[in-house]
Amino acid sequence: MCICILYLNVLSRISGSQATEVKVSEVEFNPNFVSRMIPKLEWSALVQAADGLGHLQDLPTELIADYEANEDFLRKVHRVLLEVEVLEGCLQCPESGREFPITRGVPNMLLNEEEA
Amino acid sequence: MEPCLENVKAIRRSKEEKKLLRKQIKASHTLLKHEGISTVSKPTKSLVVANGGLGNGVSREQLQVVLGEGGDVETLIMHPHKPYALVTYRTEVSAQRGHVLLNGRQLQCGDQVVTLYLSYVDTVDSESGVCAVLPPGLVLVEEFVSLEEEALLLDAIDWKSHDEEVTVQKALKHRRVKHYGYEFRYDNNNVDKDKPLPGGLPQACVFVLERCVRDRHVKVMPDQLTVNQYQAGQGIPPHVDTHSAFEEPILSLSLGAKTVMDFRHPDGRSVAVVLPGRSLLVMKGESRYLWTHGITPRKFDVVPACDPESPVAVTSDFSNHSNLTLSRRGTRTSLTFRNVRRTPCDCAHPSACDSQQAPPSPPSLPRSQTDACRLEAEYVHSVYEEIAGHFSSTRHSPWPRVCHFLSSLEPGSIVADVGCGNGKYLGVNPEVFAMGCDRSCALVQICSERGFQAFVSDALSVPLRSDICDACISIAVIHHLSTQERRQAAVEELVRLLRPGGRALIYVWALEQEYNKQRSKYLKETREQAPPGNSTDDHNQETKGLTGNSTDDHNQETKGLTVNSTDDHNQETRGLTGNSTDDHNQETRGLTGNSTDDHHQEKKGLTGNAVDSHNPAQDPSSMVMECSKVLPVKDSPVKLSVHTNRTAFNSQDLLVPWHLKDGGIKKGGRVSKMTKDPPIDTKSPVLAPCPVFHRFYHVFQQGELEELCARITGVMVQCSYHDQGNWCVILEKTRDR
């Protein structure tokens, strides 16, 4: 479950203590793809999640202007978005505190009958 | 927030190491998922050796040698049939050395090469060494006949007349079977009690029967004999001999090579019993009426290592597993003697009894949210969890028009596949960012293993932000929701996810399986398009007598409608199990017998469509209206009928069977029933009595999906069409909402 998904997700809080297994793999870099994804992300949430997993590295905390042309920047985003994966951990809803487990890379977002 | 580096394995490794690590992790995930074995990352004295099991063809002796390279092995546990072994070294250091030396090691086992993956596990419990217990009522008598007597008996069986009827090819694939005394009938699972076979039981067997009576294994001389001959690699699927056909006990004399017979209790317990040559197996009580028995088709069996001639039983629990090895099979002939039953069975096991069993009461259409959730939990979600693997294997070809929709999206689009199943569509367009969600953990896990982004969630409550998706697809999903309100809510959820201007593609199973003079694949066995002139649809189709297993009062004759297959749906020819795969891979397992060729000639046994060349095709929409009008509204709950696969739908809300392919009773599975056809009692080459699961469907009438979308504000139906037995719409979320 790559970090990317987490920002697309309302429940986007994840911290280092909650991710017990994170994997980094190599994914082919596609600058166009990354550029197109960026406007769809909540930047601050991305930063927070990356930080929480210990993978913030040198990703800027603010989205820079003119990022499409900035390959260096795009590569940093690429790494965090597509190469860092949470295999085991949990997602926490910032409002309710309800935790959703991530097992073997798969988050389980089912609510109980009472919660739905 | 301080990053917890010690908890995070983010070290870059060389490609080779990474690959090995990936495979090791994948192996350990599989072990967790299928075997409940949890691996740990910190070294311990114990390791699980994935692929190093008896189930992989690896023998104890071989593995012991290899493991010894690490150091002294304290215990080595190899469960029968399992694809792993558990080793405990004397010291942690030895375990670590073993791990380093053996992770990724390849072993030659017979004609196969297996690769071992090692992971640490918490200390393995020591075994109790309790003796395994045979199923109640089962007795094994060794050395029941002498070597000379065995030779005489084998000589006396005349296979010549058998082989004349059966082709050589068949004889090689299936075990050889011959009956004496009474004839078996496949259509009613029973013996033809009024037609004894001439000749009775062979003279050579009389002494065996007399001995059985003398030794009080049976009171009355058996009057029916079935001879089975098994070559190595042949077996017989698990079954219970039909109660109403035969009394108890059932006596089985094994001649030739020994084998292992598996007994399984409905609660999942299993016992493997070694049957040595010249032994007599006596099945009474539970072992005859309740536990299934079968012989797995394979070339090796797992038997106790120290005393191969002793008939020790091996259970599914953890006893005895430190002392097992492999035994190669040879040719075995069994003589099974039975007494034909002439009065209804009155055994103490009605659940397995065809004389006593009442049909289970069918579920009804829900009338509240709670009922709806419960119905879907039982007849959708848990079924998919059980059948996930098999289901996924039949769903591998994406449908062209869905692919077209996906391929026409802008690169960089965000696409949600709600109800993604095994992820069939997630990789179709690599230029978009596709995420799948499904209600089934097992199916989502398959997506994840394929490298797709997927999560488990309900289609009515998708945990994604509103307005985030450029496109959504929902293929063969919404028809599993059991009320109109829930189906609409599912579409509303898709719309919520879409950004203004975004589009959703929805496919649902159609009541009308034939459209525009084209039969969908659901009824056709073959893929070929109907050649012109041989049109299937110039003719009014009447599906007379098409009731399947309907218990529905409102069973309608669906005039003018034929039912055609879509590849999303399990196909089955009546009376025979056969799960077909999609368009590209017709898998017609077992005996199909009935062709559904493009001339749709009705063959025997195929419930279905009579062709009437004189009546013109009727307007499908009027057929549909006829269907819905005739259905009266009742106060009492509407019972859901069970559909007969590959036939016309006679109601919109129904249960559709899925025959699980791997046969036998699945542990803890939600089995709706065991099929009665094909027959399960005969010791003849028939198919396994596979578990049948029922899935709830609401099939949509023409126009119904559009009507549903029209009730939602802020959307526009861009187009709607019929595709291979499905109604489809493309919706757009309008910009001015």
Image: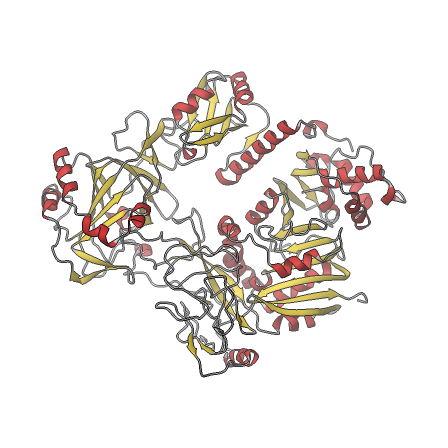
Q: Quadrant of the C terminus of chain B?
A: bottom right
Nearer to me, B569 or B76: B569
Residue A109, image x, y percentages: 64, 49
Residue B483, image x, y percentages: 58, 67
Classify residue B279 by image quadrant: top left
Nearer to me, B292 or B515: B515
Nearer to me, B20 or B736: B20
Instruction: Inspect this view and state whether residue B337 appears.
Output: no
Residue B454, image x, y percentages: 64, 48
Q: Quadrant of the N terminus of chain B?
A: top right
Instruction: Inspect this view and state whether residue B136 appears.
Output: yes
Residue B492, image x, y percentages: 69, 64
Q: Relative to B690, is B381 on the left or the right?
A: right
Q: In this view, does B541 lie above or below B161?
A: below
Nearer to me, B703 or B630: B703
Taking the spot 60% from the left edge, 50% from the top edge, the residue there is: B423
Taking the spot 23% from the left edge, 50% from the top edge, the residue there is: B163
